[in-house]
């Protein structure tokens, strides 16, 4: 399977980089393993990998803010999947705060993070809060990517899930 091939590649990466201590190497290995575990639905295993990759990219390439934001968004998603919804929310709120403070026009990433945080509210049964965050995210996503983009379709599915749970 493709996962078996990926696992073999990751194991080779670990062997080849075992002696390397540079943060950039930790970033690459942590991000690769995090993505592998996330895509295998091994969310608890992904959490420490993403944390390590985030710490490493902050040291190795602090100007790579888009990469950092993406890793942190992945961390929010895996934390939510492990049931650590409050921690996922705190990280999501921190990402939004950091992007807002930078004032670099990355409103699309803010929308993606809002949608991820909204899912934590759905998981905790706080449906009104989830819906509010999803609708705020949706406005930006539709404006920037269009109604038929997969991000909007996923978000619309989240809104339908809320409607079903509320029996709207």
Image (spheres, grey):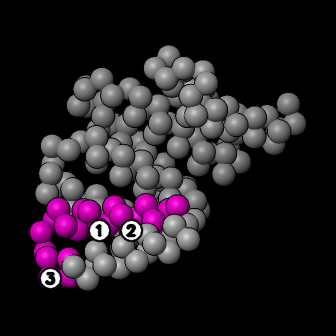
Q: Distance between the residues labelled 3 and 2?
A: 18 Å
Dot placed on the residue nearer the N-terminal end, 3 or 2: 3
SS for dot 3 = loop
SS for dot 2 = helix
Residue 97: image location, x then y, percent: 33, 37
Q: Residue at x 57, y 65 (%)?
A: 41
Is label 1 in contact with label 2 (beta carbons under 8 Å)?
yes
Residue 19's mark? 3
Residue 80: image location, x then y, percent: 55, 56
Please indicate whether residue 152 sits to the left or right of residue 46 in the image: right
The boundaries of the magenta stretch are: 17-39
Give the vertical position of 132 relative to 38 (above or below).
above
Q: Which residue is drawn at 50% across and 53% down?
A: 77
Q: Residue at x 14, y 58 (%)?
A: 59
Residue 139 in view in this figure: no
Residue 77 in view in this figure: yes
Residue 71's mark? none
């Amino acid at each position: 399977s493709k996962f078996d091939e990926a696992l073999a590649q990751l194991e080779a990466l670990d062997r080849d980089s075992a002696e390397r201590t540079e943060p950039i190497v930790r970033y690459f290995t942590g991000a690769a393993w995090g993505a592998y575990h996330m895509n295998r639905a091994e969310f608890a295993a992904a959490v420490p990998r993403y944390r390590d990759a985030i710490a490493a990219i902050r040291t190795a390439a602090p100007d790579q803010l888009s990469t950092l934001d993406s890793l942190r968004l992945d961390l929010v998603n895996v934390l939510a999947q492990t049931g650590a919804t409050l921690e996922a929310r705190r990280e999501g709120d921190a990402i939004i705060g950091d992007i807002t403070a930078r004032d670099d026009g990355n409103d699309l990433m803010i929308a993606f993070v809002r949608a991820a945080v909204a899912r934590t509210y759905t998981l905790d049964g706080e449906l009104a809060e989830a819906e509010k965050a999803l609708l705020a995210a949706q406005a930006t996503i539709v404006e920037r990517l269009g109604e038929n983009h997969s991000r909007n379709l996923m978000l619309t599915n989240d809104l339908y899930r809320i409607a079903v749970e509320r029996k709207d």
